[in-house]
Image (tube, grey):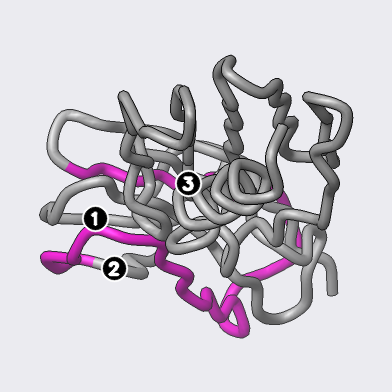
Amino acid sequence: MTALRKVLLILLFASVTGSQAAAQIGLGTGVFASGGGVMSGGAYIAVGTTGQSVIGRSTGATYAASAGFWGDGGTILEVESPVPVGLPIEFALRQNYPNPFNPATSIPYELPVASDVRLSVCDILGREVSVVVNARNEAGVHTVTFDASALSSGVYLYRLTAGEFVATKKLVLLR
């Protein structure tokens, strides 16, 4: 493989994966030598061979990114665009933290599209004790703080409704 092809291969791989994904997933360094190479980490694996495909995929709670191209004599035949980094790919209600807590906790949730959101907290009998969010939220990752200073110790449920999506999780208040 000529030096020009090696440089082009590495630059193209870096431009496909690095422009949007590197800030979030931090691809490690790697060397494509002897016609091929592998880079991997906890959230990604990238495999490449001269004249063959170079493919990488990284996913997480808030993103999914893919990259790949075919190289032949330094000519790009195909480029796959990654999913925009930073936007969730599905609705999600995450576990609050810390849990158990006293007196406040953070509740994260994710919206792939702008939605009317209602996040409420109920006691174990299903009686609503607090409405944490009742507003339109933009797409993205959101975290709200729930202050339970007025509540007694115990197990509570928090419920997120966003469009057709509904999810419920448990939190524990310890005094």
Q: Can residue 157 be seen in this view?
A: yes
Q: Label 1, label 3: how many angstroms apart (C-alpha)?
A: 23 Å
Q: Label 1, label 2: how many angstroms apart (C-alpha)?
A: 5 Å
- Residue 22: x percent and y percent? 59, 62
129 versus 148 height, above or below: above
1 vs 3, front mark:
3
- Residue 130: x percent and y percent? 38, 66
Amino acid type, callout 2: Val
Instruction: From the image, tell me which residue sits under label 2.
Output: 133
N-terminal of the two: label 2 or label 3? 3
Magenta part, dominant SS: strand
N-terminal of the two: label 1 or label 3? 3
Q: Nearer the viewer, residue 136 or 81?
A: 81
107 versus 127 height, above or below: below
Which SS class for mark 2? strand
Q: Residue 157 magenta-drawn?
A: yes
Q: Which of 165 and 153 is in front in this view?
A: 165
11 versus 39 height, above or below: below
Residue at figure coordinates x 79%, y 25% from the top left? 36
Q: Residue 15 magenta-drawn?
A: no
Q: Quadrant of the N terminus?
A: top right
- Residue 27: x percent and y percent? 72, 54
Mark 3 surroundings: few (<14), some (14-19) or many (≥20) residues within 10 A: some
Instruction: From the image, tell me which residue sits under label 3.
Output: 63
Bounds of the magenta segment: 134-162
State the mark number for residue 118: 1
* Left or right of 174, for residue 145: left
